[in-house]
Amino acid sequence: MTIKKLTQATKEITNYRNDIINNLLKFAVTDMLLFWGTDEKLQAQQAEQWEPVLVWAREEFGGKYKTTQSLDVQKENLESGEGLKKFLEKLSDRQLAAFYLAALNMRSVLLASALIKGKINSEQAYKAAYLEEIFQAERWGQDSEAETRRKERKQELNDIEKFLKQ
């Protein structure tokens, strides 16, 4: 992703701002940080990388953000959107464009929030977002297509971080 694409996305945000915010709020209840694995080694890594973001998000947005090991969306998460909505509404079009693209990249509104607010950098965001994939690759072996895709995603996150600092 280039800065040019992020600039174009910023122009498009203006026309669809409310729809984008509403879609992000719906997406937040299925945020990947809320669904933990069952493997103890993976859980230890999730606790190390994900829990600080969850603690910050709970404080920042006043939401409960309850985690689970099942595929069921927790009731508390359905009720945790008001603070996040206020946060998203305060973002400039430029910030919201970067936020939206980061959230899609990482499958996580909460990680995108932490990246936008400077609580984590693009490297930390990448490691947290692709933690499970990297964990599985280390366990079962690398897949060259998946590795190439992760490198592209990592570069996108670096570009987003640079874009936000301009």
Image (spheres, helix red, strand yellow):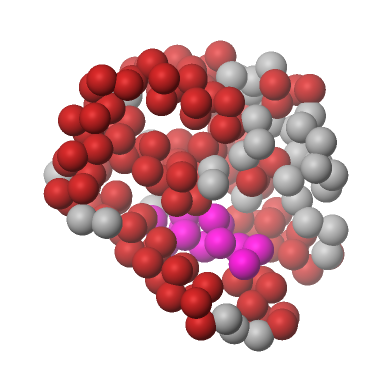
Viewed as shown, does residue 121 lie left or right of 107? left
Viewed as shown, does residue 150 lie left or right of 49? left
Q: In this orientation, which residue lies closer to the viewer: 46 or 19? A: 19
Residue 154: quarter of image: bottom left
- Give the percent coordinates (x, y) of residue 121: 39, 53
Residue 130 sits inside the magenta stretch: yes
Viewed as shown, does residue 8 lie left or right of 86? left
Viewed as shown, does residue 64 lie left or right of 28? right
**Considering only vertical position in the picture, is 47 above or below 74?**
below
Residue 97: quarter of image: top left
Q: Residue at x 76, y 32 (%)?
A: 73
The magenta-colored residue range is 122-133
**Considering only vertical position in the picture, is 86 above or below 41?**
above
- What is the number of callouts on the image? 0
- Give the percent coordinates (x, y) of residue 58: 62, 29
Q: Residue furthest bottom?
A: 141
- Give the percent coordinates (x, y) of residue 69: 83, 47
Residue 116 visible? The answer is no
* Image quarter (top left, top right, bottom left or bottom right) of the N terminus: bottom left
Residue 126 sits inside the magenta stretch: yes
**Considering only vertical position in the picture, is 130 above or below 22?**
below
The secondary structure making up most of the magenta span is: helix
Q: Residue at x 70, y 41 (%)?
A: 34
Residue 127 visible? The answer is yes
**Considering only vertical position in the picture, is 155 above or below 111?**
below
Q: Residue at x 70, y 21 (%)?
A: 78
* Image quarter (top left, top right, bottom left or bottom right) of the C terminus: top left
